[in-house]
Image (cartoon, grey):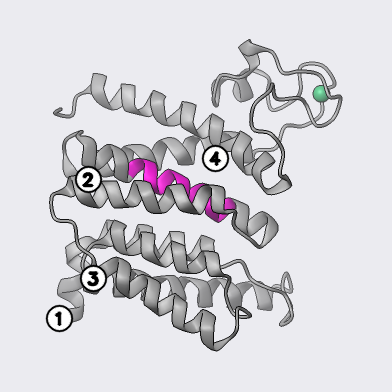
Amino acid sequence: MTLSVFSVGLLLLFGLAFGSFGSVLVTRVPKGKNIGGRSKCPGCKTQIQNRDLIPVVSYLLLRGKCRNCKRKISLRYPLLELGSAAVIVLPSILEGYIDPFTVTLGLTLWIFLLLAVIDHDSQGIPDVLTLPLIAVSFFSSYFRGNLLWEGPILGGVFFGVQWLLSRGRVLGSGDILIGIAMGFILGSWLPTLIGIGLSYVIGAIAAGALLITGKYNRKSRIAFVPYLFAGTMAGLLLGDRMIMFFIF
Ligand SMILES: [Zn+2]
């Protein structure tokens, strides 16, 4: 499908709906809660009405407060909805068309984003989301028309070796699965290597900033998935330009 105001708008709405579901997942999955059932206000436990469940719009209409108890609704809900819509639409915008490849890549980035938020919140990532990440990223690579194994193998081995050498202390086994998915997303070995390298650069800058501002001390365990996500996004956006830069 070619890009038009209609098709992009439709994909955006689809992205916002996924973002709304994503809020439910990042809140409930780490706590092992059932993802079915209606959302409640964490303040007054009132069930949230349908008219207050419209992504972003409801937050704005309610001016960020619960309709019942007026407790502040966290800004992370509308931000996660917007972020989800952005990453779901992005591959189609970059490619200039909508097809199974761009849609599955968008969904891959969406699951990746949720994992980054969960790792940031609870310093750990659940298999119920890392396994779908691998599956959906595999399909996006398949639909791209050139299923490449060198990226996934490189990503898996790179994190697998660190995991083995540190006996799981430096990073978790879930990071190995993330490395494999990064390979499916970025394709061949060079973009995957660049994506991993960018993750470390962004992570080092962020860790330095957090140490200086005193938000972290040397003993804090820093969640790594947000940086892997940032590095992957940077690798995707810079794309071939980055490779040119490294070669010349
Ligand atoms: Zn309330």
Label 4, label 2: how far apart the Cα atoms are: 21 Å
Question: Which residues lie in the magenta part?
Answer: 106-117
Res 38 visible: yes
Please state which amino acid type lies under the numbered disc 1. Answer: Ile
Label 3, label 2: how far apart the Cα atoms are: 23 Å
**Looking at mark 4, is its residue's CB closer than 8 Å to ligand 1?**
no
Q: Earlier in the sequence, mark 3 or mark 2?
A: 2
Q: Are marks 1 and 3 in contact (CB under 8 Å)?
A: no
Q: Is disc 3 surrounded by few (<14), some (14 to 19) or many (20+) residues within 10 Å?
A: some
Residue 113 within the segment the image draws in magenta: yes
Residue at which label 4 appears: 80
Residue at which label 1 appears: 247
Please state which amino acid type lies under the numbered disc 2. Answer: Leu
State which quadrant residue 172 falls in.
Answer: bottom right
Res 93 visible: no
Label 1, label 2: how far apart the Cα atoms are: 23 Å
Q: Residue at x 55, y 31 (%)?
A: 21
Q: Which mark is residue 94?
A: 2
Q: Earlier in the sequence, mark 4 or mark 2?
A: 4
Whether 158 is drawn above or below 35: the answer is below
Label 1, label 3: how far apart the Cα atoms are: 19 Å
Q: Does residue 11 appear left or right of residue 148 in this picture?
A: right
Q: Does residue 168 appear left or right of residue 239 in this picture?
A: right
State the SS at label 3: helix
Please state which amino acid type lies under the numbered disc 4. Answer: Leu
Between 18 and 215, the residue placed more toward the observer is 18
State the SS at label 2: helix
